[in-house]
Image: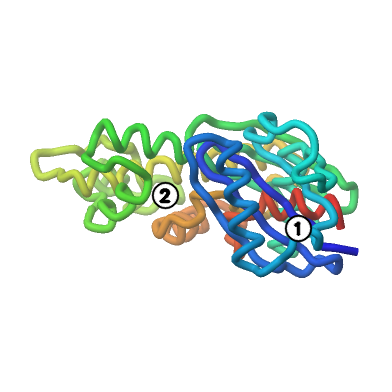
Amino acid sequence: MGIILGIDVGGSTTKIVGLNPDRTLISTMMVKAYDQLTSLYGALGNFMDTNGLPLSGVERIYITGVGGSYLSGNIYGIPTHRVQEFSAIGKGGLWLSGLDSAIVISMGTGTAFVKADLAADSYKHLGGSGVGGGTLVGLGRRLTTAEDFDALCVLAEKGSLKNVDLTIGAISKESISTLGADITAANFANLNSYTTEADIALGLINMVLQTIFSLGIFAARGTDCPDGPIVLTGSLTDLKQIDSTIESFGLLYPNRFILPPKAVFATAIGAALHGC
C-alpha cells in the first residue's frame, strides 16, 4: 500500500498532510494562494518535492474543505476522493487529541462546531459562526494599519486589553457569582484616548477567541455531554493569545479545552484518515 494524502482546501489557505498506511504522519504543509486550484496544486507539488516523494508513491488523495468543490476528477491520475468537511473535522480532532468523543471546533476563516464520536463513527455538525479568521482580517484592515493576518498578530503583541475591554472588576466592587474581577464584561467598551492600534489589534483577537470559546460551551450544553471535552483545531490555534483564553475559560466552565499538536492540520488529517 502507498501513501495517503489529505488536502484541506480552505477559503484562504490549503493544508496538506501525508499518512503512511499504518497511520503514522509523514509531514504537514500549508500554502496560501489567490485561488483555490492554484493553492491546491501548489501545495501538492511543494509537499511532494520537499519530502522527496514520487507521485507514483501516492495511492489515494482525499480532498475536503470549501475549495474542494472547484476540483473535478482525479489529480494527476491518482484516485481522488471528496470527504465531507464535518466528518474530516471530527476525525482529525479526535485522532490528534487521542479522545473517543468530544466537541471539535474548527477555527478557520469562519468557525464550525462538530460533535464527534469515534465508536459510533458519528460526526454531527452542531452549527457554525461567521466569526473567525476572516473577521480578524476584515476588521483589522478597517480599524488598524495591519493589511493581513500576520501583520495584525505582530501588532497585537504590543497591545494591552486595559485600554479596550471593560472587566467585571471595573463595574463591580463585589464578585458576581463565580466571575473574577479580570473577566471581560464587554469587549471594546473601554476605548479611550490612550487606546493604540496595538490595543485594538489585541482586542480584536481577544473578542474573536472569546466568542468562539463561548459558542463552543453553548454547543456542548446542547448535547448529551454538556461538560465534556472541547478540542480546538484550525488556523486560529496558532494565535499566541489562545493559551490565556484556554486558562480563563477553564476557570469559568467545567469543560476541558484541549489544544493538540498539529491542530492547524486537523481537517486535512481527518480527510486522510478516511483512506486508512
Q: Are marks 1 and 2 in contact (CB under 8 Å)?
A: no
Tag 2, which secondary structure? loop
Residue 222 position, x and y percent, is 70, 35
| Residue designated by label 2 | 179
- Residue 126 at what x, y percent from top left? 70, 34
- Identified at 47% across, 37% down, the residue is 34
Q: In this view of the protein, which residue sits in the foreground, 240 or 109?
A: 109
The numbered mark at residue 55 is: 1
Point out the tag, 1 or 2, that comes first from the N-terminus.
1
Specify the quadrant of the image occupied by residue 144.
top left
Residue 273 in percent (x, y) is at 80, 55
Q: Single out the residue that lies furthest toward the left.
A: 193
> Quick check: 83 left or right of 180?
right
Q: Nearer the viewer, residue 100 or 54?
A: 54
Q: Taking the image as drawn, is residue 258 in sight?
A: no
At 56% across and 40% down in the image, what residue appears?
38
Label 1: which secondary element: helix
For the C terminus, the quadrant is bottom right
Q: What's the distance in space between the residues labelled 1 and 2, CA to CA? A: 55 Å
Q: Position of residue 121 (x, y in %)?
A: 87, 47
Q: Quadrant of residue 171?
A: top left
Query: Does residue 204 sit above or below 93 in this rendering?
Result: above
- Amino acid identity at mark 1: Leu
Relative to the observer, which residue lies in front, 14 or 227? 14
Q: Seen in the image, is 182 located left or right of residue 32?
A: left
How many residues crowd around disc 1 within 10 Å: few (fewer than 14), some, or many (20 or more)?
Answer: some
Q: Residue at x 62, y 44 (%)?
A: 40
* Three-letter amino acid code of the residue under disc 2: Leu
Q: Residues within 10 Å of mark 2 (few under 14, many from 20)?
A: some
Q: Is residue 164 visible?
A: yes
